[in-house]
Image (cartoon, coloured by chain):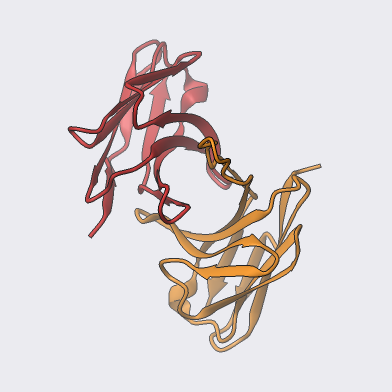
Chain colours: A red, B orange
Amino acid sequence: SQKIEQNSEALNIQEGKTATLTCNYTNYSPAYLQWYRQDPGRGPVFLLLIRENEKEKRKERLKVTFDTTLKQSLFHITASQPADSATYLCALFKAAGNKLTFGGGTRVLVKP
Amino acid sequence: DADVTQTPRNRITKTGKRIMLECSQTKGHDRMYWYRQDPGLGLRLIYYSFDVKDINKGEISDGYSVSRQAQAKFSLSLESAIPNQTALYFCATSDILTSSGGYNEQFFGPGTRLTVL
C-alpha cells in the first residue's frame, strides 16, 4: 500500500541552526510534493512545491530537495528562529487521482 | 475576512446525534475538500468535490456524507456520530489543475474541533 512517513518525534533545535526534516514515501510515483506549515489550532499553510523533475527548490530560508530514486524529500530551515516552531507536513500529489495525500507531520521546536 | 471559514469552530455532541459542519470560501475555487486530523495520523481525506455536480469519496468516507450547495459552500454531515469520530476537521479549497500542470496548492480553513461523547 502507499505510504508517506515523516519523523513523528519532535525536532528540538537551537536558534540559528539548520533544521532538516525528512519525508519518505513508498509505492508512489508522485507528480510533485508539497510542504505545509501548521501552527497549533490552525489549518495548514502552503510553503513550497517541488516537481518530480526538480532536484531543489528554495524560498527565503527554506530549501526543499526531492530525490525520486531514494523516494525522499528533505526540508531545510536555515538560520532557524523561534517563530519557525510549528508542525511541518509533506504531501504528495499523483496526477492520476487528482488529490493530495499527507504525511503525519514533524513538530519543530526552535529554542532561543 | 478569512478566505475559508468553518462553522462551528468547536462542538461537543453525544453518540447518535446528527451533526453538520459547514464550510464557505470566497476564493472562487471549484475544488473543495474535507479532511480529518488525528494525532500522529496526519490529514486524511474524507470527501472531495471538483465542482457543484461532482462529489467523490476519499479514503475514510464511511459514516460521513457531504453536500455541495454552491461553488462556495461544502458541508460535511455525520448522520449518527460515534466517539471515534472525535477529531479536528478541516475544509480546504484549491484551484483547478491546469493542463500545463499547475499545482494543486490547498487553502485550509481554521478547523472544527468535534468531540463525540
> To which quarter of the image does residue A42 belong?
top right
In this rendering, is residue A62 above or below A73? above
Whether residue B56 sits left or right of residue B32 in the image: it is left
Whether residue B61 sits left or right of residue B110 in the image: it is left
| Residue furthest out toward the left | A70
Tell me which residue sits at (46%, 78%) in the image. B83
Tell me which residue sits at (67%, 74%) in the image. B20
| Residue furthest out toward the right | B1
Residue A96: give x, y in percent of width and height: 40, 53
| Residue furthest out toward the bottom | B16
- Which sits in the foreground, A49 or A85? A49
Residue B59: give x, y in percent of width and height: 41, 67
In this rendering, is residue A40 above or below B25? above
- Which sits in the foreground, A50 or B81? A50
Whether residue B22 sits left or right of residue B50 in the image: it is right
Tell me which residue sits at (18%, 32%) in the image. A69
Q: Is residue B44 visible?
A: yes
Q: Quadrant of the N terminus of chain A?
A: bottom left
> To which quarter of the image does residue B62 belong?
bottom left
Q: Is residue A87 visible?
A: no
Whether residue A66 sits left or right of residue B65 in the image: it is left
Q: Quadrant of the C terminus of chain A?
A: top left
Residue A65: give x, y in percent of width and height: 32, 23
> To which quarter of the image does residue B10 belong?
bottom right
Tally of marks: 0
Residue B92: give x, y in percent of width and height: 60, 52
